[in-house]
Amino acid sequence: MSVLDVLFTRALAEKLAHTPTIVNGVCPGLCYTNIRSNIGGLDVLANRIAELLFAHTAEVGSRNILYGAVGGPANIEDLRGAYIYRCDLREPSDYVVSYEGAVAQEKIWVRHFF
């Protein structure tokens, strides 16, 4: 997930904090799939090397999505606006939790939805 994704997720979670809806961001990681089958040129080689070095199966990647949807810690409030990677709640970057990150988060929300 990019920083923008994390900021958007946190902003949406804040807006829905007083509802039963829980919003979190999930990163399945690089997975072996045919979703990139239309790439060409040198991108094919770069993609293949990245897959050999870093990718896991789509089944393993989907576990993160399932964890975000139905799993999690006993304290459900920990999942609101959380970033999930490898079936674990991860701490956002220092920028995301800083004052500058909060300002950027609000700008992203206002600019795209109003």
Image (cartoon, rainbow, N blue to C red):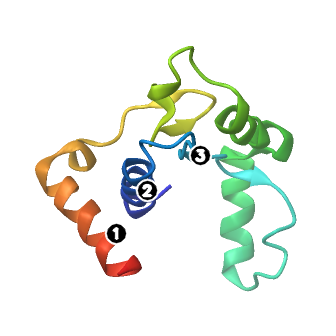
Task: Please tell me whether residue 1 is drawn above or below residue 24 in the rendered image.
Answer: below
Label 3: few (<14), some or many (≥20) within 10 Å? many
Label 1: few (<14), some or many (≥20) within 10 Å? some
The residue labelled by disc 2 is 12
The amino acid type of the residue labelled 1 equals: Trp
Contact? badges 3 and 1 (CB < 8 Å)? no
| SS at mark 1 in the image | helix
Q: Along the polypeptide, which appears first: circle 3 or circle 1?
A: 3
Q: Along the polypeptide, which appears first: circle 1 or circle 2?
A: 2
| SS at mark 2 in the image | helix
Task: Please tell me whether residue 87 is drawn above or below residue 97 in the rendered image.
Answer: above
Out of 35 and 111, give the one closest to the viewer: 111
Q: Quadrant of residue 69?
A: top right
Task: Please tell me whether residue 46 is drawn above or below residue 9 in the rendered image.
Answer: below
The residue labelled by disc 3 is 26
Disc 1 to disc 2, C-alpha distance? 8 Å
The amino acid type of the residue labelled 3 equals: Val
Q: Quadrant of residue 20?
A: top right
The residue labelled by disc 1 is 109
Q: Position of residue 15 (x, y in %)?
A: 39, 54
